[in-house]
Amino acid sequence: MVKETEDPTGTETTHETTHDHAHDHAHERPASAGARRISVTGARMLREALRHGGDALSAAVREADDGLLLSALDEGLPAERATRVVVELVRRAPERGPELADAVCEKVLLAQLYLDPPHRAPGGAGGPAPDPDRRLRVRNALMLYEGLVRPYARRGAVPELMACVLPGLWTAGDGAGREVVRRIVGTRQSTGFGEKGWKALFGGVAEESREHREAAARAARRAARRRWRRGSADDGSRIDLKPGQLWVSALLGFIAVALVLIVVIAAR
């Protein structure tokens, strides 16, 4: 079938066949399908390399794009393997354009710097077992903040996002989040938190403090009620005599005994 189209110059009519269109789209489809295959293959290779380590890990991390590396962190990695990914993400920072840099910054912030471990072994009565990789996770979080967040903290949606993330970061990782925030604040550089971020952080800390005070007050009231109930039960089953009352009771007992003896003697 032939379709006529007017030439943009208006000087001649060109003929274009649907076969030509099909031929062009046939070239486009394999290209996009090939890109998808490459992406899936790259993800699989990265996953396998991260699982097994070895010499293939460095090459797989270098060849993976930012999306694959961030997805690997999302899935959860042992801290040592996560460090390899974090180092590569930070190394690429100067190569990213503004739009991609902002996107990576926002993704890392939303993940709270990937501070939480991927899984925690169940603990005993005292709660979850301690995280042996906590120090390394704190270091990874600081690397991500210094390399991917702080330089872009005043751009785009990051200030608003910072205000949403900081209170959660403060409570993340069973205290590790507090250490990260304190170490960010402890540097001589600007924190990058911004006014909104600081307000949100102070508000979260104040709310946490208020909850602790209320919990302590409730515990004290419960303990006082238990003591009062025990005291009331003891008072109901026991008569406590003061020293003066003891002397009076003894005297009355002596008089009663004497009267009984008098009656007995008189009866004889």
Image (cartoon, helix red, strand yellow):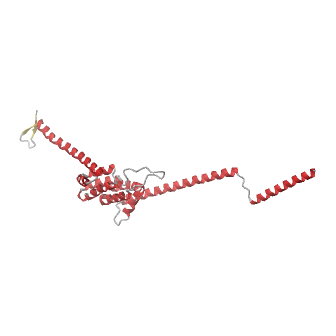
How far from the left and from the top, in percent, is residue 51?
A: 30, 50
When asked about the image quadrant of residue 105, the answer is: bottom left
How far from the left and from the top, in percent, is residue 196?
A: 38, 58
Q: Nearer the viewer, residue 83 or 91?
A: 83
52 shown above or below 190: above
How far from the left and from the top, in percent, is residue 2?
A: 10, 34
- Residue 81 visible somewhere in the drawing: yes
Q: Nearer the viewer, residue 100 or 40?
A: 40
Write the residue at 68% across / 52% down.
235
When asked about the image quadrant of residue 19, the answer is: top left
In the rendered image, the residue lying farthest to the top is 1
In the rendered image, the residue lying farthest to the left is 11
In the rendered image, the residue lying farthest to the bottom is 188
- Residue 99 visible somewhere in the drawing: no
In the drawing, does residue 244 fall left or right of residue 137? right
Write the residue at 26% across / 47% down.
44
Q: Nearer the viewer, residue 3 or 180?
A: 180
How far from the left and from the top, in percent, is residue 197?
A: 38, 58
13 shown above or below 114: above
Q: Quadrant of the N terminus?
A: top left
Write the residue at 55% across / 53% down.
219
Count of labels in the image: 0
When asked about the image quadrant of residue 3, the answer is: top left
In the drawing, does residue 13 fall left or right of residue 40? left
Q: Nearer the viewer, residue 36 or 205?
A: 36
